[in-house]
Image: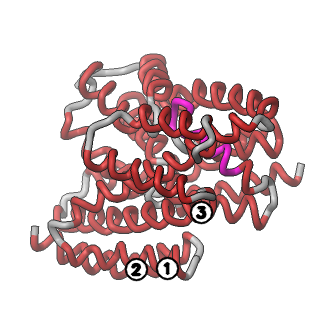
Amino acid sequence: MSVLLSLFLKLSAFSLIAFGGVNALLPSLLKLSVYQEQWIDLQTFADYFAIAQAAPGPNFMTVTLIGWHVYGVLGALIATFAIAWPSSILVYHLQRLILGMKDVQKKKSIQYAAAALAIGLVLSSAWQIALQINHSYAAYVLTIVTIGVTVLTRWHPLYLIALGAALGMIGVI
Amino acid sequence: MKTLTPTELFISFSKIGMSGFGGVLPWARRTLVEQDKVLSSEEFSAILGICQIVPGPNIVNLAVCIGSRFAGARGALAAVLGLTLGPICIVMLLAILYTHYSDLESVQGILRGISAVGVGLIASTGIKMLRDELRFPLMLLVVLVTVIAASYYQLGLGWVVLIASPLAWVLAQKKARKL
């Protein structure tokens, strides 16, 4: 039972500092769940990350899977609820305030500042997660190819995910 | 303005949740603006802007904002439930399969391949967002400080935000005056 409580409390706190969305949070989530709380080992974390990427739906499902790993269906539901409720309540109350803001300069400033923070967090998240879960040069090459293709073309991400799966299956990665 | 009941919100957001691979935000726009036409493109962008500055899962924030706009707190709840219930079921089914087959060499390979692509997808989201910053390159300093604090010094997320936000705020005010 105490593991459910700590799952709930730790992830609720995460919700309020997850600037840039849950992807920006991944390295902290990894540190917490693998090294501090030892809910899960590194390999399983990496695998759950992959499953969440491959499944339809929001990409915060890595959190759902960690909850599942810790305490089955109840754990999955509690983890998902915990990552969502504090920020939901915050945005519920903030949206009218920000949308109704008369001072255009101030409104823009808030958006620009938050955007810059989010970019930094997302980029460092990708970097740190890559260091943890890419174990071969081939994996880094695939990551870099993915970046190139997504930035330069309009390919659907699903093709890249399928490509990654295929390369992994034949043992290249 | 079009009205939506909590049930309709639940259905719309179920469609959104179940259709997105590699993130659902683009699907949210497609469903709400292009297909169901419940929001104009400008309204959608304004709401999305708010959801991205507030912490937490952006897509859940979006469901809360849009749900509450059409049907108050009950609408927000309906939208969030629609968005999450289907994907949670699917992901748990996959987790069950995983516990049975994770020992297979081919399954491990597939997951390694998908992870490598997944990291690339996250990085490219960041790089695409970076393009907007080039209109006011000084802002890249904030990105740099954030990356150094988070990746090189490995500080926790809360510290990184605390350290980078004063600089972000000062530069953002400059940028808002200039553009």
**Who's the residue at 72% across and 33% down the image?**
B95
Q: What is the x, y in percent for residue A85?
A: 59, 47
Q: Distance between the residues labelled 2 and 3?
A: 17 Å
> Is A56 contained in the magenta span?
yes
Q: Which residue lies furthest to the right in this view?
A: A1
Disc 3: CA contacts within 10 A as few (<14), some (14-19) or many (>=20): many
**Which numbered disc covers residue B145?**
2
In the figure, B5 relative to B141: above or below? above
> Which chain is disc 3 placed on?
A
| Amino acid, disc 2 | Val
Q: What is the x, y in percent for residue A151?
A: 29, 50
Q: Which residue, given by chain and number where applicable, does mark 3 sit on? A: A27
Front-most of A120 and A170? A170
> Which chain is disc 2 placed on?
B
Q: Residue furthest left?
A: B178
Q: Which residue, given by chain and number where applicable, does mark 1 sit on? A: B149
Compared across the picture, whether A21 is left or right of A114 comes to right
| Amino acid, disc 1 | Ala
- Tell me if I can see residue A26 in this picture: yes
Q: What is the x, y in percent for residue B119?
A: 50, 52
CB under 8 Å between discs 2 and 3: no
CB under 8 Å between discs 2 and 1: yes
**Who's the residue at 33% across and 58% down the image?**
B127
For the record, the magenta segment spans A45-58
